[in-house]
Each structure stands twice: as C-alpha cells, then as structure tokens.
Image (cartoon, helix red, strand yellow):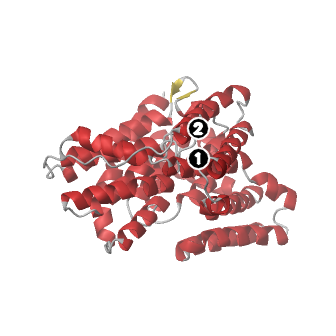
Amino acid sequence: MRYLALATFLLVYALFVILPKRRAHVAIVGALFLVLCGVLTPKSAVTAVHWNVIGIFVGTLALAEIFSYSRMPAYLAELLVNAAGRTSLAILFICGLTSFISAFVENVATVIIIAPVALSLAKKLKISPVLLIIAIAVSSNLQGTATLIGDPPSMILAGFAKMTFNDFFIYHGKLGIFFAVQIGAIASFIVLYLFFRRHSERISLERKERVITWIPTILLTIFIVCVAFSSFIDPEFRFLAGVISMFFGLISLIWYVWSAKGDGVKFVKRLDWNTTLFLIGVFIIVASLTETGWLVAIADALGALAGDNVLFAFLLIISISTLVSAFVCNIPYLAAMIPVAQQVAADLGVDQPLILFALLIGSCLGGNITPIGASANIVSMGILRRQGYVIPFRTFVKLGLPFTLAAVSSSALFLWLVWRY
C-alpha cells in the first residue's frame, strides 16, 4: 500500500502537468482509486478533506461573481486612472487595485474583473496590452497570498495549521504573512515601475462606468468582517469560516436571482467547480502520503540535508518551492509539503511559522515566473489570445522573473528577521 500511494501521487502529479485542463478529473479519479484499493477508507478520505476550506472557496467565488456584476471594480479602475494623470502611474494604480481586490477575492476572478479595464486603457492609449495584462496577473497572485480568503494555497495553509483570518496579520504576537507580502509588494512594484516608466504620457479617461448596485460591495465588506470575527468563536478554524462563506454565497445567489433578475442556474455554473473538485481530490491524495509515512520520510531527508543549520533549511524550503511552483500547480505541492515543513520545523526546534510562511511565499509567488505557474497566469494568457496576441514563454518570464525575485527575496528577509528570534 505504501508504494501504491507514492506511485499514484507521482502519476497524478505528472498528469496535472500534462493535462492542465483535466486537473479536476485527474484528482478525483486518483482519490477514488486510492479508496478503492484500500489505501484509505471512505471515512478517512472524507475526513481528509478540509471542508472549512472548501466552504470558504465556494462562498468567495459566489461573492466575487456579484461583485463583478456590480461593476464596482471597473468603476474604481476609472477613478484611479483619472487620479493618476500619467500612463505609468495609471498602470501601477490598476495593478494596485488588482492587488487589493485579490487579497479578498480569488485570483482568477480578480483577473477576470480587472482585465477588461486594462484592455480598454491599452486601446485608448494605443499601446500593447500584453505587459499590462501580465502585470495584473502577477499582482493578483502576489496579494492573494496575504489573507486567508485570497487564494486556495492560503486557505490550505490555514486548514492544516489551524490559522484564523486574523492570524495572517498577527500570529503568536508577531507580524504575520500579510506584512511579509506587503514588503514583497513594495519591492515588486518598483520592478513594475521600471518596466512601465517610459509611458509618461498624460491621460484622462471619459467616465463611462457606473456602479449598478452597492449591495455586492456591502455584502463583501460584511463578509470580511464576519470571517475576521469568526476566529474568536472558532479559534481552531474547524467550521465557522466555511459556514459563514457558504451563507454569504447563498445570499449572493438569492440576491442575484430575486433582485438582479439574473439566471440562477447560469450563476451556479459560472462558479469554478473544477478547482473545487481539484481541491477535494488533492486533499485525499496528500492524506494517503501522510497515512503511509511518506511525508515523514521526506521531512527526515530534508532535515538530514539541512542538518542543524536553520538558515539553510529556510532558504532550501523557499528556493525549492519557488522553483517547483514556477512550472507546476502550487496547490498539490503546498498541500503535500505543509506536513513536511511542520516536521522540519519541529526537528530544528524553530517556530513553525518561519518554515510554513517560507513555504507559502515560495509556492505562491514562484508561480509568477512563468505563464503556466498559476491559474491566473493561464487565464490572462487566454484573455490576450482572444485579443489576437500569442505570447511567447520568454515574454512572460521577462516580467515575471524579476517581479518574483524582488518579491520573494524581500519577503524572505522580512520573515527571517521577524520569525527567527
């Protein structure tokens, strides 16, 4: 059973890379195979899924759908562009808006919300939208790491480590991952400025966008407050945040059907069920490695390689994570490596957050290096393709690599200074 679990994991992982559009199918089939073969019992498979995380993910998708419908993001983008006055600053403001939204809304949804505004801006200025869309994609991936509800990897970390919404800000009395990401954002936005500074033309957009309704914005705000306060009632992060998210998702659906007169069936279909099923399958597959002892073995190997050198272990985790996530989906990698990182931290006798946050930073921001490293990147490339732009691999890397190196290195320095001692 032990080697069957490992072989299944490796095969499924390879298929994630080979068949990126079929990741959900591969994950579910792999999970069912492990249960049918007796590696996991049906009960252990069900309990392996972090249902709280699934609830948060689905609920935020529904909220993002009505937030986009309200046209609030596009309205804010127009305000920022006109406030900027110059093209280079307008581009940075749009990337900043993308970052802000993606801290509370799933990254792919954020790109879909902001991309039309960026395309309109590029058309008005008669410039290529390629680097602008790429900048939006990497900006969304960056801030999606900052909060519990920003992106699935953050939700997964919270699920394993029992971290609440507030723990991303202050954890065990120290500054949390949110502030590490902000340090990385400052460094990476300097990179963006260097790329776009040549666009110094003055700009003013005709105000066309209007907010259809303020209800989605109000619901999203109340939702964030409720999730933040849920940690006081459910400090172990067992169920409440997921229940709250699903409740607000249901309210979003009801409001869309009854007040906005929308099609409820189409609304539900537009939600990202593929990623939802993918997450469920990945949780079960990773649980098989835990049950059969492989994750402990990997942790022991990494611990032996690092010895008693905490700095080397820290740099090893963040470097490997950045490199791996540049080419493969970070969700299964992160889910598999969190127990490993926890064991490495225990063996070294250091605070778990030092290693866990390094893992999250590397696995999330590393996806910004290439167009296949994150779902938001793939979506952004699809948007450009529909506009008639075929983007070479090197074009994405030209912006993604320096952006990532700046963000990861500065975030890593912050984590080391705050969490090592």
* Residue 401 seen in this snapshot: no
* Residue 53 in the image, given as x and y percentages of width and height: 67, 47
Q: Is residue 150 left or right of residue 76?
A: right
Q: Is residue 293 above or below residue 188?
A: below
Tell me how far mark 2 sits from mark 1, CA to CA.
8 Å
Marks 2 and 1: CB-CB under 8 Å? yes
Residue at coordinates 74% horizontally, 67% vertically from top-left? 31
* Residue 356 in the image, given as x and y percentages of width and height: 56, 42
Residue at coordinates 80% horizontally, 52% vertically from top-left? 47
* Residue 233 in the image, given as x and y percentages of width and height: 73, 27
Q: Is residue 166 left or right of residue 118?
A: right
Mark drawn on residue 325: none
Residue beneath label 1, please? 63
The quadrant holding residue 402 is bottom left
Which one is nearer the viewer's eye here, 30 or 74?
74
Q: Which quarter of the figure is the N terminus placed in?
A: bottom right
Q: Is residue 88 above or below residue 5?
A: above
Q: Amino acid at mark 2?
A: Leu
Residue beneath label 2, please? 219
